[in-house]
Image (cartoon, rainbow, N blue to C red):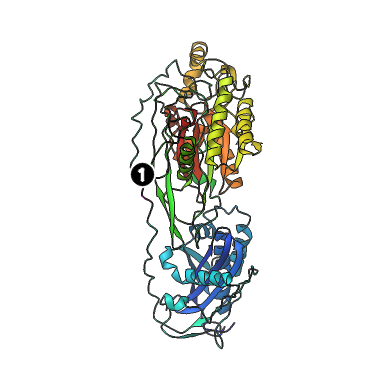
Amino acid sequence: MTGAGADPEAGPAREFVVEADGGSRGNPGPAGYGAVVLDAATGETLAEAAEYLGVVTNNVAEYRGLVAGLRAARELDPDATVRVRMDSKLVVEQMSGRWKIKHPDMKPLAAEAARVFPPGRVTYEWIPRAENKHADRLANEAMDAGARGERWSPSTSTADLDTGRSAGGRTATGGGARAGSGTGAGTGAASAARTGAPGAARPPAGPTAPAGPTAPAGPTAPAGPTAPAGPTAPAGPTAPGATGSAADATAAPGASVSDSAGTRGAEADAGPPAARGDATGAPGPAGGRGAGAVEGQAAVGGARSASGGSAVRGGAGAAGPAGPEAGPRPDAASEAAAGSGAPGSVGSSTTSQAAASADVRAARTVASPGWGPPDMGAPATFVLLRHGETPLTPQKRFSGSGGSDPSLSVAGREQAEKVAASLARRGTVQAIVASPLARTRETAGIVAARLGLEVAVEDGLRETDFGAWEGLTFGEVRERYPDDLNAWLSSPDAEPTGGGESFAATGARVAATRDRLVAAYAGRTVLLVSHVTPIKTFVRLALGAPPESLFRMELSAASLSAVAYYADGGASVRLFNDTSHLR
């Protein structure tokens, strides 16, 4: 390759800046990348590369742009040091080694990028999209050319001039450096690079008008301060996992959404599991009045908007406080509707068509991400459904994974049917995973039959084993095993009498299960049918809350909650203990 800096006799190695970008109009959809190599000292444009890739995802296009930019820099000077600047937080963090790379499409591209220069010669820096205009323009030029059935041509490109990079003219041939992408051509692929005439140091790109964040719904009315747990646990409520007030909780549906058409719309790739929170959880007695249980607090994310290919996530909240009693309470939680907060309950005075429309709006609101970088992509959304009632639920008895494994009662099956109808209206669930216990598999089966999906079984979603306490009420356990109960209430490491499972062990199991499922369902919405303790632990870990916070959560039979997991390892609780569908 010829061009500035290519002569090995020119003296010490140079320093380059590589700016790269990629986009997909559909994610996946027609995609392309752009990359530019700059002289770090002068800001002069030394080489450009762009290519139409056919139908791929946004992140794949970004990685392809990175590889092309690095290769163009290497052809200019194989001994150079390179500073990569990109507006993709995902690519920057993964290539810097701070985030894990789990997606199979990303791993080989990241490895290819790492091989272009020796280790230590390339550094990575995230920049706002407004400062990455040059590469963004090149990517869009490549996509526009592909849409016309043409190859991107450096002779017709105006990206350098549009961004004010070069002060003089530039040529595409005769001294113009050409850089092949080297990453494999997509449909109608074309790539090239050119040198630019020396110019003044590159001025910062003017800020682009951001897509204004969606107006957040007004602050939600808090459910009121919960009564702190007293020094001793009340004798009435059952412990988490008990089928009464300690019964399992369920999560509300939240469909995954992708960015609007344009160059943003990142494909989610799971981040470091360690970032998601502590691996242990210590739920206390679910539904305990003295423990300050709160039912029906729903946090709903705001809608994502897009403008000019960029997206901004806004947050909106909706709370539906209710009383502390467990069980299918009709006033447990209100179902949030996008933009208005209108309830979408079954059996309300509205027509069935209006109810279905409200459910769809609610699902879209739950699915939309909160504040964060626009290139995080669609999250993995867990819709957490607690199974319906069993004969033990009204009696408030411990019912874990080591007991009689009861099936649903008549009331429990009716609850499952109502959940299925609500989820069918929302139309957001793409897969179903259930605990292996009978009550969860039966609940999942009723929902799956309505949605036309199969049910996968995940052992990590099972309820805690309560040892010798299985089948007993909280009061009976206090009477028979007072010391063991007090120890269990005081420490997540304590086990129930008879060698049951501690909440610390349950928390570690749930955290590991969460990481497997996030990786398996990246960018999708999956219904997890589980129990009180696992669902409360999912929520606690997502919030980064201390173990004692679980004493203040109430989870009703057949309730819904939702947690979204993003590519950077962050999590967002979207809904908690919603039972509006049971009205």
Q: Is residue 180 left or right of residue 15?
A: right
Residue closest to the eye, 549 or 77: 549
Does residue 111 appear in this view? yes
Residue closest to the eye, 237 or 18: 237
Q: Quadrant of residue 447?
A: top right
Q: Is residue 527 left or right of residue 371?
A: right
Q: Residue at x 62, y 31 (%)?
A: 446
Q: Quadrant of residue 433?
A: top right
Q: Residue furthest bottom?
A: 174
Instruction: Please tell me how crowded label 1 is: few (under 14), some (14-19), or many (20+) other residues with Cα within 10 Å.
Output: some
Residue 215 among magenta residues: yes
Q: Quadrant of residue 130?
A: bottom left
Q: Which residue is mark 1?
A: 217
Does residue 43 appear in this view? no
Residue 471 among magenta residues: no
- Measured along the vertical axis of the image, is residue 481 above or below residue 580? above
Q: Residue at x 49, y 46 (%)?
A: 275
Residue closest to the eye, 338 or 409: 338
Kind of residue at badge 1: Ala
Q: Position of residue 383 (x, y in %)?
A: 53, 38
- Measured along the vertical axis of the image, is residue 120 above or below residue 533? below
Q: Position of residue 155 (x, y in %)?
A: 53, 82
Q: Residue furthest top?
A: 479
Query: What is the quadrant of the N terminus in the image?
Result: bottom right
- Measured along the vertical axis of the image, is residue 476 above or below residue 548? above
Q: Is residue 422 left or right of residue 436?
A: left
* Type of secondary structure dominating the magenta stretch: loop
Q: Position of residue 351 (x, y in %)?
A: 46, 35
Q: Position of residue 505 (x, y in %)?
A: 56, 31
| Range of residues picked out in magenta | 214-218
Classify mark 1: helix, strand or loop: loop
Residue closest to the eye, 410 or 221: 410
